[in-house]
Amino acid sequence: MKNNVSLSLEASHLLKGIAIILVLVVHILSSFKQSVFVGYGERFQTLAVLIDKICRFSVPLFVALSGYGLSQRYFQKPFYFGEFLRHRLWKLIPKYLLWSAIMILAVKIIPAWHSDRPNPPLSLILLLGYADYHLYFVPMILQLYCLFPILRFFYKKWPNLTLFLALLIQVLWFANFSYQQKLPFNWSIFAADHEQYLWASNWIFYFVLGMALPRILIWLRQKTFVWNLILITCLLIGWLALSINAIARIQMGIDPLLVLRFTQYSMIAWVSLGIISLSFFASQLKTVPKIMFWLGQKSYDLYLSHTLLLRLVFSFFVW
């Protein structure tokens, strides 16, 4: 691997491998019938929250790597939206439709997996990723792909302003979730549990942050060891502070799913520091373990399929 400030193919796959492992850990923690966040005593609760919080880099890291990859591929050459979109759709949609169909059939066949919620039309299931709880990612990333030409135009002209506006959009969007009961119209299509993750506005800052990674990595390379130590220290303090706050709120009786969700604006700074730190670390490595490279290569397949495996394991082998 070349030792430079950009992310090589190996470094990108390493980061994708890390991201898919973190996704898997988050979903394992949420798969127990008795919540690991409230049902096994305070010590286990503390450990579970600490693990869950550090794994919250997962999906934002995938989103940032998408922004990074597209910027590296399309910033320096003519951009044709039709060709771009066809290529992206071909990479995403066939496997997405396959695994959506598998999950729809599996839920119908296995009684324990049936849901009491009314089934939406098939077109809506596929359009909004309702076939399983993690499939929101595909409609969400497709929205960001459609926004990419606009973001590319503005970022090339005004990079700092584009990054700031993306941050502002995401912060305001997150803040609205706290006030959905006070709004004069039905906000649930945007703010219900699944829908909070579905819309591009929930992730747009991470996507633009990925586009900005080369500039950030160059800046970090120019800084002293002390600056890097400050970055790591802030990351650790943020992790502990967010974890302590989450534990306190869970002990107050607040649903852990609400406490630990991605869409909290208090998470944005800490997750962003994590994305930058991991990317800088990966850019410095000369070699990548083969297993991590393979995980990165297969991360999309693993993402689509892992919940079926978890359902099978926890349904038949875990109490």
Image: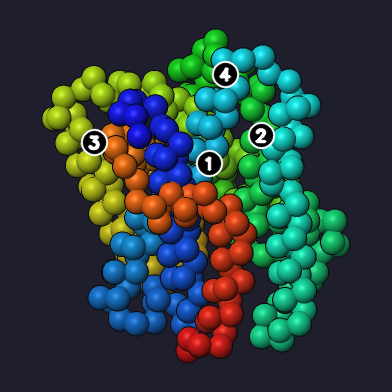
Does the residue at mark 1 contact the one at mark 2 (Cβ under 8 Å)? no
Look at 48% across and 79% down and name the residue there. Answer: 32
In the rendered structure, which disc, 1 or 3, sits on the residue that comes first in sequence? Answer: 1
Above/below status of 132 relative to 32:
above
Element under disc 4: loop
Residue identified by numbered label 2: 145
Label 1, on which residue? 63
Q: CA distance from mark 3 to mark 2?
A: 30 Å
Q: Nearer the viewer, mark 4 or mark 1?
A: 4
Contact, CB < 8 Å: mark 3 with mark 2?
A: no
Distance Cα–Cα, label 1 vs label 2? 11 Å
- Comes first in the chain, label 3 or label 4: 4
State the residue lying farthest toward the left. Answer: 226
Mark 1 Cα shell of 10 Å, populated few (<14), some (14-19), many (≥20): many
Name above or below for residue 173 compared with residue 101.
above
Mark 3, residue position: 231
Q: Nearer the viewer, mark 3 or mark 4?
A: 4
- SS at mark 1 in the image: helix
Q: Position of residue 87 (x, y in %)?
A: 72, 35
Q: What percent of the width, then of the height, locates residue 193?
A: 60, 59
Mark 4, Cα crowd under 10 Å, few <14 / some 14-19 / many 20+, is some
| Residue kind at label 3, given as amino acid type | Leu
Q: Amino acid at mark 1?
A: Val
Identify the mark at residue 115; answer none if there is no mark: none
Foreground of the two, 242 or 214: 214
